[in-house]
Image (cartoon, helix red, strand yellow):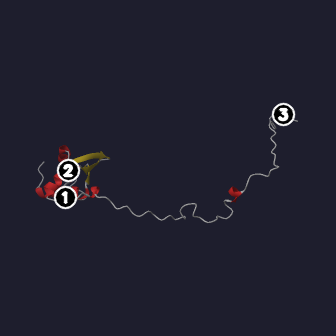
Amino acid sequence: MLVSKQNRKVIYEALFKDGALVAPKDFNLPKHADLDVPNLEVIKIMQSLTSKGFVKTQFSWQWYYYTLTDEGIDYLREYLHLPQEIVPATMKKSARPAAPRRAFGGDRENRGPRGDRDNYRRKEGANGDFKPEFRGGLGRGNRE
């Protein structure tokens, strides 16, 4: 399919910027949702890049999901004349946010007394003269 150089460049730039691209499976859609290019041209350009091994295609629920491969990154860098420092958004390492502060006081060792809630744990066992009596069989027909 013949695609103008201007439209091809717009598609390539969007793909390289994000590292991924989505397109609905609607060949009659006049414009792509994110790009000012006919949706058919987006799908066909991506189909061409897939056949060359520059893009990986996933299809689900009538949507095409395209992700850029390492070879595709090299190809688009060459095509768009970009330096090595510029990478797609999917390849950038995101800075991990600091560990969230615990809302309920953290570890158990650092907590103060909790009133009477834990008192059942602190009691010793039964008295030394405690002798439990087990009389089984009551209520099962054994009457005494």
| Residue underneath mark 3 | 142
CA distance separating discs 3 and 2: 85 Å
* Callout 1 touching callout 3 (CB < 8 Å): no
Q: Is residue 27 visible?
A: no
* Above or below, 51 relative to 73: above
Task: Please identify the quarter of the rendering in which residue 134 is found.
Answer: top right
Q: Nearer the viewer, residue 84 or 89?
A: 84
Q: Most extreme residue toward the front, as rendered?
A: 128
Q: Nearer the viewer, residue 31 or 130?
A: 130
Residue 3 rendering spot, x and y as whole percentages: 12, 52
Count neighbours of disc 3 (C-alpha within 10 A) and say few if under 14, some if 14 to 19, many if 20 or more: few
* Callout 2 touching callout 1 (CB < 8 Å): no
The amino acid at mark 3 is Asn
N-terminal-most mark, 1 or 3: 1
Residue 117 rendering spot, x and y as whole percentages: 67, 60
Q: Nearer the viewer, residue 72 or 100?
A: 100
| Residue underneath mark 2 | 72
* Above or below, 65 relative to 80: above
Numbered disc 2: secondary structure? helix
Foreground: disc 2 or disc 1: 1
Please give the name of the residue rendered at 67% of the width and 59% of the height, measured from the top-left corner: 118
Please give the name of the residue rendered at 77% of the width and 51% of the height, measured from the top-left corner: 126
Q: Is residue 63 left or right of residue 44?
A: right
| Residue underneath mark 1 | 84
Count neighbours of disc 2 (C-alpha within 10 A) and say few if under 14, some if 14 to 19, many if 20 or more: many
Numbered disc 3: secondary structure? loop
* Above or below, 90 relative to 134: below
